[in-house]
Image (spheres, rainbow, N blue to C red):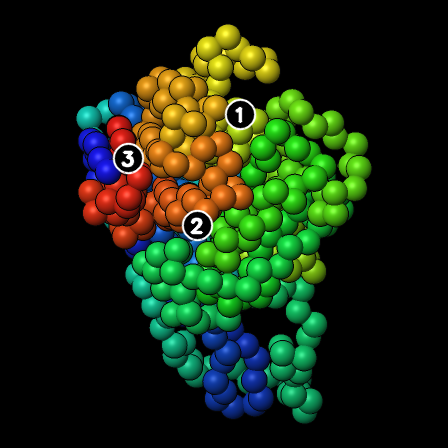
Amino acid sequence: MRHDSSFRRRSSLTAAAVAALLTAGAGVAGVHVASAATAGCQVTYTVTSEWPGGFGASVGIQNLGDPVNGWRLTWSFPAGQTITQLWNGTHTQSGSQVTVTNASYNGAIPTGGSVAFGFNGSFTGSNPKPTSFALNGVTCTGGVASPTATPSQTPSQTPSQTPSQSPSQSPSQSPSPSPTPSATPPDRPMINNNFPVTREGAYGTNRYTVFRPSNPSSVGRTMPVLVFGNGACAHTNGSEVVQALTFIAARGFVVVDTASVDGSPNGVNSGSPIPSLLTDAIGWAERENARSGSPLYQRLDLSRVATAGHSCGGLEALIAGQDQRVDGVVSLDSGLFADGSFGYSRSELSKLHTPVMFLDGGPSDIAYDNTRANYDLVRVPAVLAEQSQAGHTGFITGSQMTDGMTAVVQFLDMTLNGNATARSYILGSSGLAAKAQWTVRSKNF
């Protein structure tokens, strides 16, 4: 076992939330107590990748106060950083001052709910993290203040004798998460989760199979999304990956696989890479996150999206990983060919903008040389993890599946969530590199 690494510590910030008091209401004649609204938020700012002069970041907003319908997040960059591209929102920037407003599909945040966006940026010199955020004009400081009753001297002309209905009697359009994030603390490694998993056909299309925690509210926070391409570019029958993807989903991911749930024809040919299937799967997730009545309604963290794939599906993941909505890439027993087979040359690797993990099964893996060559060529932060006995399919269907999928989960937890324990497992000498028959290399972290 061997581990080789050179890395820079990723910036991660959790800035938090807080209280503002807004009073409103009507009353009966004489002094009355006005109703008041509470406001509070928690913001998580994570630098997901960094390269000379540029970086990628994800920003998560959790609403701790009353429901929000339309949000605006503001902050100031401390070193003149500039946003060059942003997704899941709209941004404006004047000097160091940044304002991000919701997209058309993610403006509503229920109490305890979350929304997220991501962006790429540029910097000169240093890239320190922002230290203060405000949601709809209220500074986020980490808690919710109880509203103070405000006496009003204005008599009401039309006192109401009928009490208003409790909001709980109104039908809810959103399965809003229970405000008990302690169920899954933000710093809890995802590998420690083990949720029951539902495997189902994707709503509105038979091109995808979805693996997700059966009760999304039990996860306690919005879930990252992984879109997955199958070995042999199998776009109809995904039975080979059921065990592996169930393992990942049980850790708190929503996994969208490029095959129909029952193996029935879906109009998509198999055998050649179709990277757009993976990017379209991200679009499907965006729509489900916005669709009232979906079990995933406002449950997804769309600033934490990754692509992954096995063998031919790994080619799909590497190409789809160029999409600016993607924050991490995993290539299992795969790599772009030197001769440009399947229509994609190795020059495509220069278009990756996120950390990438390559896994291979040792010299007996048909993709062994390709995997190593691709790792050598990429310029983004990268990990090469090799299990000498796994061969070409051990991570998917063999005895190395648990170790392989553990490595995938830990890499994604490090990359998407900035989890320090996962980072130590992937990049440290006492984690994956210490396991028998594993060799780990890394660069640019």
Is residue 98 placed above or below 218 in the rendered structure? Answer: above
Percent x, y of residue 327: 43, 37
Measure the C-alpha gap from mark 3 to mark 1.
21 Å
User: What residue sits right under mark 1 in the picture?
Assistant: 315
- Residue at disc 1, secondary structure: helix
Q: Position of residue 62 (x, y in %)?
A: 43, 58
What type is the residue that disc 2 sits on?
A: Thr
Taking depth in this image into account, of 63 and 283 the one nearest to the observer is 283
**Where 418 falls versus 346 (above or below)?**
below
Front position among marks 2 and 1:
2
SS at badge 3: strand
Q: Which of marks 3 and 1 is nearer the N terminus?
A: 1
Residue 163 figure quarter: bottom right
Of labels 3 and 1, the one closer to you: 3
Residue at 31% of width from left, 38% of height from top? 438
Name which of mark 3 and mark 2 comes first in the sequence: 2
Residue type at the position of mark 3? Val
Which residue, as the protein is rendered here, is positioned at the far top? 339
Cα separation between marks 2 and 1: 23 Å
- Reading the image, the residue beneath label 2 is 402
